[in-house]
Image: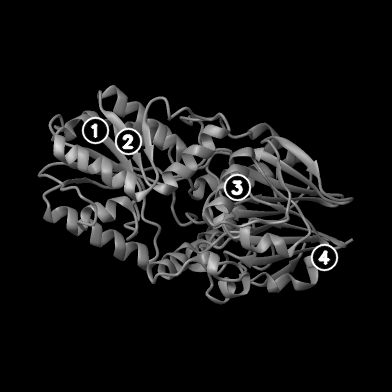
Amino acid sequence: MDIELCTVGGYNEVGKNMTALRVGDEAVILDMGIFLPNIVSFEEEGGHRRDLTAEELIKREIIPNDNYINKWKNLVKGIVISHCHLDHSAASVYLAPRYNAPIIGTPYTIEVIRNMLRDDELKIPNELKQLNSNSKIRVSKNIEIEFIHITHSTPQTVIVSVNTPKGSIVYTNDFKFDNSPTMGKKPNYERLKELGKEKVLAVIVDSLYSYHAKKTPSEKVAKEMLKEVMFGTENDENLIMATTFSSHIARLSTLLEFGKQLDREVLFFGRSMWKYINAAEKCGLIDFKSQSTIYAYKGQIQKKLKKIEKEGNRKDYLIVCTGGQGEPQSVLSKIAGGKFPFRFLKEDSVIFSNSVIPVDVNIKNRKEVEEKLMHKSVRIFKDIHISGHGGKEDIRDLINILNPEKIIPSHGHKHVTGGMEELGNEMGYKVDKEVFFMKNGERLML
């Protein structure tokens, strides 16, 4: 029984993650994500993704080109989604119907996918199957899927172990080792160490920060950074507005906690904010609605902003909104650009509690928003953030724990993931012998 891996997407770019694994005459797919810059550009031009077929989305390089695995399509027994981030999950609503297989994810991930289907008014024939962290499910005679709890920047992220009679293939895309998470448990080191004592044929490893000679700090550090800004600056008479990734429920929880401590009414603005918060509430992870108000739609947001402007009591509010990447359709961009009925006043605070995903369209959009804010004499606090991706030393620890025979760097092209060559050499793994830098559509026999 041979085992073959195909790197379908996410190996030529940061995003569009999709990997397929064939075990004899059975196969599984790991992640189905979109390439966010291309979907942003398409929607800025007035397009809507639901108007495009899967083939058109592939042609525009918005979703992975699964034609690379045409011959495997009837072999696929499961579509496994590691976590809810769009670059790992959002293509599933377009590509999954091409396979007679269930979509498997943690309860939160599945709830986010349900929201995507409702948002885009789509229906798919695939069963949406929930699997809890630290649980297993057999999808075929030779393939067992195991979810191992790991920390990241969104709830219920898992490392996926594909267990076969010949050994395991471990998919760690995305991960960090956070030993003091502000939400949820520490990583399941015990199970990872058990796997390392067994036979790990290969690890597909999030290598986005493989060049960064560091261990990524805990989310509790980001909490302290936010505390310093929100409690340690003169803002008693001014509005505080913050933006972060809508899926970063732990960060949103911190903002809510601090807003209440400052005796401010906390408002969440934006459709994606509503989508991820609603999914987390349905899964029992949080209770935001009893402590704050969430406005999803343009009309609701405009009405509330008009009221705040008219009453002149902005010092009583913390607004948490979309727009950390400077997206033109986000709430922050529309306020900064004068499209929403609200004026920033001198020394109002805007906190960017996120990084900029390093692609040209995001860098350009974010710069434009910052320039507009500066012209209004707004106080800007940037990079109040800790990443959800492990650095070089986290990756080293993971490899030492798992002791894999082969390493496949993932989450970007070699310009991004190339730090794995140096790390591999340090650890006794050689390029093209044990470390394989792959491109989209390539295959490797394990």
| Count of marks placed on residues | 4
Left or right for 312, reference 123: left
Q: Secondary structure at mark 2?
A: strand
Quadrant in which the C terminus appears: bottom right
User: According to the image, label 2 marks what residue?
Assistant: 267
Asked if marks 3 and 1 touch (Cβ < 8 Å), the reply is no
Quadrant in which the N terminus appears: bottom right
Q: Residue at x 69, y 35 (%)?
A: 134
Q: Amino acid at mark 1?
A: Tyr
- In front here: 330 or 252? 330
- In front here: 160 or 302? 302
Left or right for 224, reference 438: left
User: According to the image, label 1 marks what residue?
Assistant: 317
Crowding around mark 2 (Cα neighbors within 10 Å: few <14, some 14 to 19, many 20+) is many
Residue 343 at x, y percent in the picture: 15, 48
Q: Earlier in the sequence, mark 2 or mark 4?
A: 4
User: According to the image, label 3 marks what residue?
Assistant: 114
Distance between the alpha carbons at the discs numbered 3 and 4? 25 Å
Q: Earlier in the sequence, mark 3 or mark 4?
A: 4
Q: Earlier in the sequence, mark 2 or mark 3?
A: 3
Q: Secondary structure at mark 4?
A: helix
User: According to the image, label 4 marks what residue?
Assistant: 74
Asked if marks 2 and 4 touch (Cβ < 8 Å), the reply is no
Q: Amino acid at mark 3?
A: Arg
Q: Amino acid at mark 2?
A: Leu
Q: Earlier in the sequence, mark 2 or mark 1?
A: 2
Q: Amino acid at mark 4?
A: Asn
Mark whose residue sits in front, 3 or 4 = 3
